[in-house]
Amino acid sequence: MAIATSIAAALVAAAAFVLLTRGRTRASVGSRTGTARRADSDPAPAGLDQEGGGRLDDGSGEARARAGDARAVARGTATFASAAAARKAIDEQDIGVTRRQFFNRGILAGIYFATAGFGAAALAFIWPAVKGGFGGKINAGKLSDIFDAIDAKSAPFYVPEARSYVVRYPADALPAARKAKYPAAILRNLEAGFVVENQKCPHLGCRVPWCASSQWFECPCHASKYNRVGEKRDGPAPRGLSLVVAEVVDGDLVINTGVILPGMAIGTDTTRQRPEGPSCV
């Protein structure tokens, strides 16, 4: 979980870095361009008035009229030229962040944050538990006490934290178990006198309870049935109950719920146990 959090933080930092580096400081839109300032500061040509309308030494009325017309035209043309020059000089580098850039960067940031969140959630989901709880190793207690509880109740010992049943395995069935090619890790458990079975039905995942009357495991969903050691005997299930690896440490039974193996194939029947009473389903 700590690794997932670190990755998410790195992705968020990368997104922030991209956004910050792309947002450069630009000139204000309202500032006057150098071209406009130069145009305003240039003096009128010699012989013309300050408006550029005509020669001042021509005193005729016609000349003055032409000069007035020229001044009016010059004023409009200068205004138009200044505006055109300003528009040409101000490009995206001077404007700052345009509306399009704002939305593009907002979408990009949203993608970064969504990717970071999804990545963190995915890693947290698939990261195995390192200690305690389902997915890790669970101490079920003293194996001798578990055997006593099984014998006293004639029923499997259920371990809620492991979502599993602990069942005695008869010693006289070991030759058949070896012939059936049980996995090596499970065969060691059988030789120690027990087997640990996952509670989930391999058909559609329902929890399979113990039937005290038949002394079998019987699924209430679709009537799949398994003998005491979890070998499939009836119903639509594709195989026996899943097998959970366990070990005995200083007399304690430690169930490793991080290692769950597929149940035995259909037809496996090492104990030859038949129903010992009415079925529950």
Image (cartoon, grey):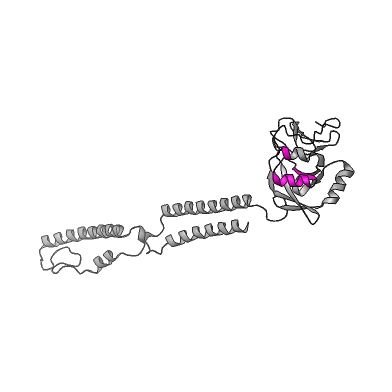
Judge by depth and name the residue closer to the eye, 65 or 179. Answer: 179
Q: Nearer the viewer, residue 205 or 82?
A: 205
Quarter holding the C terminus is top right
The residue lying at 78 percent from left, 41 percent from top is: 174
Q: Is residue 238 magenta?
A: no
For image coordinates 59% across by 56% down, the residue present is 4
Q: Which stretch is magenta? A: 178-200
Task: Measuring from the top left, give residue 252's x and y in whole percent.
Answer: 80, 54
> In percent of the image, x 56 and y 52: which residue is there?
119
| Residue 186 place in picture, x, y as percent | 73, 45
Q: Nearer the viewer, residue 144 or 100?
A: 144
Residue 75 visible? The answer is yes
Q: Is residue 124 above or below residue 243?
A: below
- Of all residues shown, which one is farthest toward the right? 152
**Residue 25 placed where, x, y %?**
41, 64
Residue 189 among those drawn in magenta: yes
- In this orientation, which residue lies closer to the viewer: 158 or 89? 158
* Residue 224 in sight: no
Left/right placement of residue 256 relative to residue 31 reads: right
x%, y% of residue 223? Answer: 76, 31
State the image quarter where residue 275 is shown: top right
